[in-house]
Image (cartoon, rainbow, N blue to C red):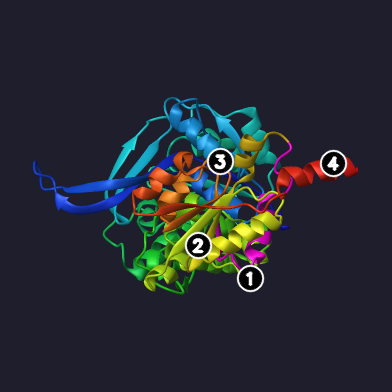
Amino acid sequence: MTGRAPLLVVGDALLDRDLDGHADRLAPDAPVPVVADCAERLRPGGAALAACLAARDGREVTLVAGVGEDPASRELTRLLEPWLRLIPLPLTGPLSEKTRVLARGRPVTRLDRGSGTTREATDAARAAIRGAPAVLVSDYGRGTADALRDVLTGHPPLVWDPHPRGGPPVPGTRLVTPAEQEAHRFAGQGSGAVGELRAAARAAATLVEELRAGAVAVTLGARGALLSYGDQPLLCPAPEVHGADPCGAGDRFAATAAGLLADGALVGEAVEGAVTAATAFVGEGGAGTLMGLSEVSTEAAEAAESGDGVRAVLARVRAAHGTVVAAGGCFDLLHAGHVRLLQAARRLGDCLVVCVNSDASVRRRKGAGRPLTPLDDRVRVLLALGCVDAVAVFDEDTPERLLAELRPDIWVKGGDYSGADLPEAALLQEWGGQAVLLPYLDGRSSTRLMTRAAGAL
């Protein structure tokens, strides 16, 4: 951890799925696009997304949310396990799922299923709220905030992030962060005033008074956010305007604001920091790239100045029509064999992205007691190598999903595979990539190092 304050997130968790392909023709039976060659990405959604974003900031996070035993709930629990502590609340039905169909990153349609709502509070959830120094409520209207409204009223949260189907924040909340349309709805102004700063300012002032909130920050998308304490508002403009996917920007805003307030920032400082973070989040591709391309915590990324972001590296190399090389492994104890392999891989192209197993993935593959070196430290060491341009982390047992997002031209494996059974070879062929083997340096292995170290004790 980095010394950042812990955060408790209370709200409604979703399972989000993106199906991203290309649409080059219309269907013969209806004037609708045919989206082909879809790659599937799963990620936490709703309050679970806000919680994961806070955890990726290097913060200790606990999530209180409705999660059941249905397949979507189990998948969400698996995605959350490496990042945070989950206190589940019982659901009335299957977890809500949101599936977006995209064509080259642009949404075509959305499919929703799962009607489960939080059935009741639990003693564990109530105790967690009472004992938490900092609480963020992310209310998507699926019952969690309502089930815990009594205890939240007695312990008002730092930030309440309302959504269209949710109820009003409890009185005494320090900062309420509605989107513009939600602000008008809560203030009883309808949706006709959306886009007018004067109307947004009136809505914010009304909400400060009616909700007895410390402040209201109305998020305005590419324009930034309007902060009101009930009088003259402060406009916090976005530092840049991006045309990328804004999905999840509101959760990024709320998670950042709550974290900064928990760390002792003033409300104005927290809102300005949240605008900056949400703008950068959209510029990097938004929630659609969350679980594949940037699983490295802020602490690890800041620790190695030589490590550019994955997306920036890929964009730069592909703009110059260069060759993207990727290599993967646990890299629990980095040794000379690893270094030689990575150096050779880098010489095959114009950049090298190293795909690293998360701590949970290593444990499943290697057993209890592994990894010896935690993820942040493994990332730091890899980024310090001159031959490594970027690091991406995957939580699955194998890197197929991450490779489908990276789509490298060359995928490098150590020489303990034969060409016939290289697991990722067929996947690489889908986009014309090539899997290659490179020989290991004889006599070097992490297992051998651990055995020798144990024998010397």
Q: CA distance from mark 1 to mark 3?
A: 28 Å
Instruction: Tell me, for residue 370, which label it has, or none.
Output: none
Q: Magenta stretch containing residue 389, yes or no?
A: yes
Three-letter amino acid code of the residue under disc 2 = Val
Along the viewing direction, whichever of 297 and 456 lies nearer the viewer? 456
Q: Is residue 362 left or right of residue 203?
A: right
Query: How busy is the neighbourhood of tag 4: few (under 14 within 10 Å), some, or many (20 plus)?
Result: few
Marks 1/4 in contact by CB < 8 Å: the verdict is: no
Image coordinates of residue 174 in percent, x first then y, are 58, 56
Quarter holding residue 237: bottom left
Secondary structure, mark 2, is: helix
Quarter holding residue 382: bottom right
Marks 4/3 in contact by CB < 8 Å: the verdict is: no
Q: Could one spot residue 292 in this view of the protein? A: yes
Quadrant placement of the C terminus: top right
Three-letter amino acid code of the residue under disc 3 = Leu
Q: Which residue is mark 3?
A: 80
Q: Earlier in the sequence, mark 1 or mark 3?
A: 3
Q: Which residue is mark 1?
A: 305
Q: Mark 2 against mark 3, which lies toward the viewer?
A: 2
Q: Is residue 108 left or right of residue 30?
A: right
Instruction: Tell me, for residue 310, which label it has, or none.
Output: 2
Q: Which residue is mark 4?
A: 454
Secondary structure, mark 4, is: helix
Query: Which span is picked out in magenta?
Result: 369-391
**Where 443 falls versus 344 (above or below)?**
above
Secondary structure, mark 3, is: helix
Q: Mark 4 against mark 3, which lies toward the viewer?
A: 4
Q: CA distance from mark 4 to mark 2?
A: 36 Å
